[in-house]
Image: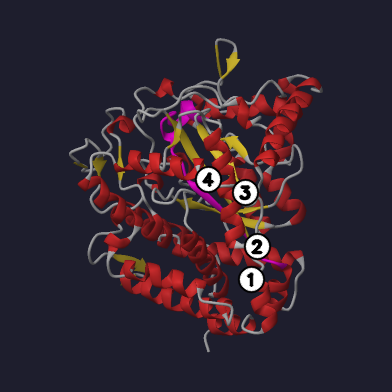
Amino acid sequence: MTEFERNLSRLSNEEGRLALRSMGRGIEREALRILPQGLLARDPHPQALGSALTNKWVTTDFSESLLELITGVNTCVDGLLEELGDIHRFVSHHIGDQLLWPQSMPCFIDHQEDVPIAQYGHSHVGRMKTLYREGLKRRYGAKMQSIAGVHFNFSLPKSLWKALYGDQSQETISTGYFHLIRNFRHQAWILPYLFGASPTLCSSFLDGREVGLEFDTLSSGLLVLPWATSLRMSDLGYTNSEQTNLRIRYNSVQEYVSDLKRAITLPSERFAELGLEEGGQRVQLNTNILQIENELYSPIRPKRTAHSGETPSDALDRAGVEYIEVRTLDVNPFAPHGVSRDQVLLLDLFLLDCLLLPSPCWTDECQQQTQRNFDTVVARGRQPGLALEYGCGDSKPLSQWLGESFERWRQIARVIDGDQGSDYQDALTLWQGCIEDPEQTLSGRILAEQRAQANPVMALAKAHRQHWLGGQSQRLPEQRLQQEAEDSIERQQALEANQVGSFEEYLDHYFKGSEQ
């Protein structure tokens, strides 16, 4: 019996099944607001949506134009999507005739200055958030920061850790999550292969830059890498070459926190050349490789809910891992939510598989190999006969590797489904064809649409808008979302009215705390 089979057998009794049905999930979906003509909406964040600083359901990411819709933690997949749907419905009713761009790579944006940086008011924390984004703009460009994605938050109940390891201490839980993370990194290419949905980009995104890639041009003018799955996750997208040699380890909370705290103190000659101030005003938080820990571009993060003023690493150091955040998901252009129900079910199976498989320690060699595989799949994952690096000096056809994963996932699905139905097994069947036929993946499907039609993404945006303008709330009543919007404005005003000390003193205190 393999380690995977032994671990799965520990969850195959009634206690284990109940634990598996109590998994926690949350979704953060980003989307650009666009005008009916398909251009970027450049107006401020709508006041009807509340304060982007303090509203727990609706905020902004990099730009005033880039919405972020956030659910709470749900143990029911349908409840999760109902909550996300209600937030979409509320937003759609309060942005006038604007639409949500249903793809990760941005719509046509003429100039970098056309992207308005998110504003969070005059409190110290609000000013810090805006200044951080000003730094991102100068470091990477506003267009790159306008890329949208879906983040999937995942947690396991204490009863599952008890069933799996016979112990539910925080040390065991944190160790288990890092076990999962290491296997996630090893197999992370699976997600852009199946769910990557950005094989094309608007030529305006490149600003005339030579990027060393051989694009084809569609009749619509879109640029396409023929076998690409996720340009969002490629070197063109949301990555940072300055971070290549940071060497963040994923073997324990202690190692991870130590490496992250070291990383935020490392200076960058390139970013120092941008200057810290301009005209007497700060233009970035500092000139280090990372301004703050959130600038670390990682496909997965261990997380702990932080106290006010607490850095992510301090929160982890204080209380261990609470959940993990998956950051490799493109927006699904075919799903009004930006992600579909069957995708959520497959994510459950994928992450449980990462937990149940044996997980070797994380080394530099592991990091380099997994990154090469990931880069290969985002750039040419649908290429026929593609093989990936596997083990020490070996290779394995992508289809074979994915087929083996699906077989394990099916074993997990049978345990979760039990005699309660076949949801997980049905989701696997729905995606099974992608193993041998890459054109059934999301990237294959959207590219086929873009080859056949002039502007299918805009048509999808309009269809999704109509979907949300109809129907009724299912989980979050309109009045509750409206009240949160109003209350969030009052919370921001209270923050601004009760500031203590100067902004420079606030930053000094924040960074002194993060270095301890």
Q: Which residues are magenta?
A: 136-157
Marked residue nearer the N-terminal end (1 or 2): 1
Residue 391 visible in this rendered orientation of the protein: no
Q: Position of residue 193 (x, y in %)?
A: 36, 59
Amino acid type indicated by mark 2: Thr
* Residue under label 3: 71
Q: Using the numbered discs, state the Cα–Cα distance from disc 1 to disc 4 in whole angstroms.
A: 23 Å
The residue under label 1 is which amino acid type?
A: Arg
Q: Give 452 or 167, whichever is nearer the viewer.
A: 452
- Label 2 environment density (alpha carbons within 10 Å; few <14, some 14–19, many ≥20): some
The quarter of the displayed image where residue 18 is located: bottom right
Q: Residue at x 38, y 53 (%)?
A: 196
The spot of residue 75 in percent (x, y) is 65, 62
Cα separation between marks 3 and 4:
9 Å
Q: Do the residues under discs 2 and 3 have CB atoms within 8 angstroms?
A: no
Residue drawn at x 47%, y 57% is 340
In the picture, the disc for residue 29 is 4
